Image (cartoon, grey):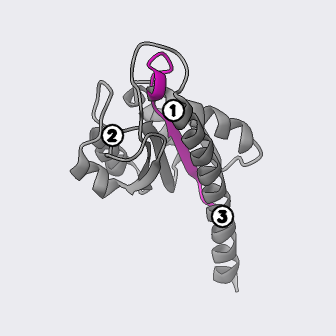
Amino acid sequence: MARIAIVGIGNLMKADDGAGMIIAAALKEQLADFPEIKTYETGTTPENHLAPIIAFKPEIIYLVDSADFSGEAGEFQLFPAHQVKSQGFSTHAISISLVIQFLKLQTKAEIFLLAIQPEEISAREGLSERVKIGTDKATIFLENKCKLQNVERKVQNKLKKN
């Protein structure tokens, strides 16, 4: 089974910036029966949660955050780590690319950013309607992706044994 870390990033008090945290919280519930998948709700300081993520020894890490990639509000995209570095996404105290660089040095994991395009980042609770819909879709997408990766890993392990 693939060890997968899902890292929710964002500020629930800044409208659509909380999308990553909302996705992580939903996935924590929905994937509770999968001990090989751990979810971390890191708020705006993912750097403060790196030690437990590294100790988990994930093979795949999904950072989940709102990020401006010039998409439509609520749209989500999965970016491999090398694209995040070149894009320079960040709405928080430390750059996502620095978190990725550190995780690359400390783990052998494949790293991705699941980015949700925000519509509004202002001082208020709750997501805009378009981002709420996108967040629901992104949650389903990532849940299915994690489950599929675990099935694929089981098949690979069986084939190696034969």
Q: Is residue 106 visible from the viewing direction of this image? A: yes
**The N terminus - image quarter:** bottom right
Name the element at disc 3: helix
Is 120 left, or right, of 22 in this rendering?
A: left
First in residue order: circle 1 vs circle 2: 1
Q: Residue lying furthest right in this view?
A: 33
> In the image, which is nearer the foreground, mark 1 or mark 3?
1
Q: Position of residue 73 (x, y in %)?
A: 44, 40
* Residue position marked by numbered label 3 in the rendering: 148
Q: Few, some or many C-alpha atoms within 10 Å of disc 3 (few <14, some 14-19, many ≥20)?
A: few
Which is more toward the observer, 56 or 61? 61
In this rendering, is residue 122 above or below 32? above
| Image spot of residue 22 (x, y percent) | 58, 31
Mark 2 — residue? 68
Which residues are drawn in magenta?
Answer: 1-16
Residue at x 37% of width, y 30% of height:
47
**Which element is circle 1 on?**
helix
Position in image of residue 31 (x %, y %)? 71, 45
Q: Residue furthest bottom?
A: 162
Mark 2 or 3, closer to the camera: 2
Disc 3 marks a residue whose amino acid type is: Leu
The residue shown at (34%, 54%) is 81
**Residue highlighted by disc 1:** 19
Q: Image quadrant for the C terminus?
A: bottom right
In the image, 12 versus 155, the foreground residue is 12
The secondary structure type at the circle numbered 2 is: loop
Find out whether residue 4 is within the magenta segment.
Answer: yes
Res 115 quadrant in image: top left
Residue 6 vertical position relative to residue 3 in the rendered view, above or below:
above
